[in-house]
Image (cartoon, helix red, strand yellow):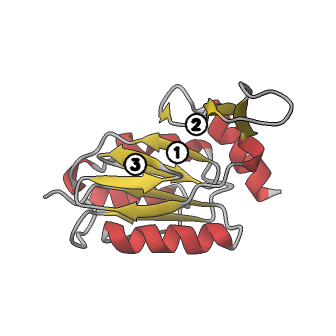
């Protein structure tokens, strides 16, 4: 139930984030017995966000190479604007207030090293009842995949590892 509510709210905030996945994703045409030109598709309901790798400059999410910072939800991926820890502000997190009641856990990856969030950001998260952890982005990738596999309503906001 929490996951379904989270998905509904995520769909409503598309104007604030640039989604990488739409309702239906079409890949290159794949030959089939019925029609050799039919594209392979899958619905968003079947989509499960999975971080498959990362480097200093990008993340590999569901086969997409995403440069820069990313916002990852169990069934949705998007680019995220902050490039440095001091750019993680209440304004850059404001979209989370739309889902704070259904969000179980927020992971914030601070790049190559673990950095503390600005004080006003930590206060905003607390005021909005958002349970969070701050870690380096590589650890955030592993934690997100683990919690998502456990069907938890988790969101990861990860900065690229470029200093």
Q: Position of residue 100 (x, y in %)?
A: 60, 53
Marks 1 and 3, Cα distance to the nearest angstrom?
7 Å
The answer to which image quadrant residue 158 occupies is: bottom left
Q: What residue is pinned by disc 1? A: 77
Q: What residue is pinned by disc 2? A: 21
Q: What residue is pinned by disc 3? A: 70
Of the two numbered discs 2 and 3 in the rendering, the one whose residue sits closer to the viewer: 2
Q: Secondary structure at mark 3?
A: strand
Check disc 3: other Cα within 10 Å, few if <14, some if 14-19, many if 20+: many
Check disc 1: other Cα within 10 Å, few if <14, some if 14-19, many if 20+: many
Badge 1 vs badge 2, beta-carbon distance below 8 Å:
yes
| Residue shown at the point (53%, 52%) measured from the top left | 62
Q: Is residue 151 above or below residue 69?
A: below
Which image quadrant: the N terminus?
Answer: bottom right
User: 19 or 100, which lies in front?
Assistant: 19
Q: Is residue 26 visible?
A: yes
Q: Position of residue 47 (x, y in %)?
A: 68, 49
Q: Is residue 133 visible?
A: no
Tell me if 47 is positioned left or right of 154 in this view: right
Tell me if 33 is positioned left or right of 130 in this view: right
């Amino acid at each position: 139930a929490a996951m379904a509510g989270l998905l509904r709210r995520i769909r409503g905030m598309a104007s604030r984030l640039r989604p990488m996945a739409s309702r239906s994703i079409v890949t290159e045409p794949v030959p089939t017995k019925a029609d050799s030109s039919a594209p392979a598709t899958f619905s968003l309901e079947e989509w499960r966000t999975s971080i498959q790798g990362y480097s200093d400059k990008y993340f590999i999410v569901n086969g997409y190479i995403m440069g820069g910072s990313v916002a990852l939800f169990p069934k949705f991926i998007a680019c995220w604007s902050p490039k440095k820890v001091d750019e993680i502000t209440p304004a850059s997190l404001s979209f989370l207030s739309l889902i704070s009641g259904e969000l179980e856990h927020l992971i914030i990856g601070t790049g190559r090293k673990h950095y503390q969030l600005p004080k006003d950001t930590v206060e905003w998260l607390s005021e909005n009842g958002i349970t969070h952890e701050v870690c380096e982005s590589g650890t955030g990738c592993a934690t997100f995949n683990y919690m998502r596999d456990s069907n938890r309503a988790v969101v990861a906001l990860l900065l690229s590892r470029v200093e």
